[in-house]
Amino acid sequence: QVQLVESGGGLVQAGGSLRLSCAASGRTFSSYRMGWFRQAPGKEREIVASISWSGGTTYYADSVKGRFTISKDNAKNTVYLQMNSLKPEDTAVYYCAGRYVTAATYGLWGQGTQVTVSS
């Protein structure tokens, strides 16, 4: 069973940057589409970005396009989310998730990491 562990969250001022990492333990996740989601207080969880198992295709929510970059290193079993030009509205718990290539939904979830952007 693959387990996902996020790291890299923290407190940053508006305009700053953070890089989140998601390390997978257990079986390799090279056959998974990986995504980053976030949930702000009082709001529903939303997808931020995702990347195919090959790394060839990516998706970004409109709210983060041009500011966030998702990448993965299959050799290290790690997915990254580089977040630049952070805004207070980016404050949320960020979750890493995995969806097997033949699955319809994301079935693997990390525990989440808090990102707080101060104005």
Image (tube, helix red, strand yellow):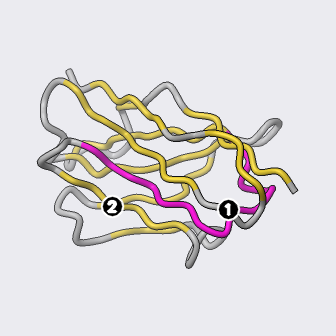
For the C terminus, the quadrant is bottom right
Q: Are marks 2 and 1 in contact (CB under 8 Å)?
A: no
- Residue at 77% from the left image edge and 42% from the top image edge: 43
Q: Is residue 110 left or right of residue 86?
A: left
Q: Is residue 46 left or right of residue 23?
A: right
Residue extent of the magenta highlight: 78-92
Q: Which residue is mark 1?
A: 16
Q: Is residue 63 left or right of residue 54?
A: right
Closer mark to the observer between disc 2 and disc 1 = 1
Instruction: Indicate the secondary structure of the residue bearing disc 1.
Output: loop
Is 111 a magenta residue?
no
Which residue is farthest right?
119
- Residue at 54% from the left image edge and 31% from the top image edge: 112
Going by the numbered disc 2, the residue's amino acid type is: Ser
Q: Which residue is mark 2?
A: 71
Q: CA gap, disc 2 to disc 1?
A: 19 Å
Going by the numbered disc 1, the residue's amino acid type is: Gly
Which residue is farthest bottom?
66
The image shows residue 89 at horizontal and vertical percentages of 79, 56
Instruction: Indicate the secondary structure of the residue bearing disc 2.
Output: strand
The image shows residue 113 at horizontal and vertical percentages of 57, 33
Q: Is residue 4 left or right of residue 65?
A: left
Is 29 situated above or below 70?
A: above
Is 89 a magenta residue?
yes
Label whose residue precedes the other's in the sequence (2 or 1): 1
Which corner quadrant of the image does residue 110 belong to?
top left
- Residue at 33% from the left image edge and 61% from the top image edge: 71
Which residue is farthest top?
1
Which corner quadrant of the image does residue 39 belong to?
top right
Is 4 situated above or below 1?
A: below
For the N terminus, the quadrant is top left
Give the class, few, some or many, for how many residues have Cα within 10 Å of label 2's Cα (few <14, many ≥20). Answer: many
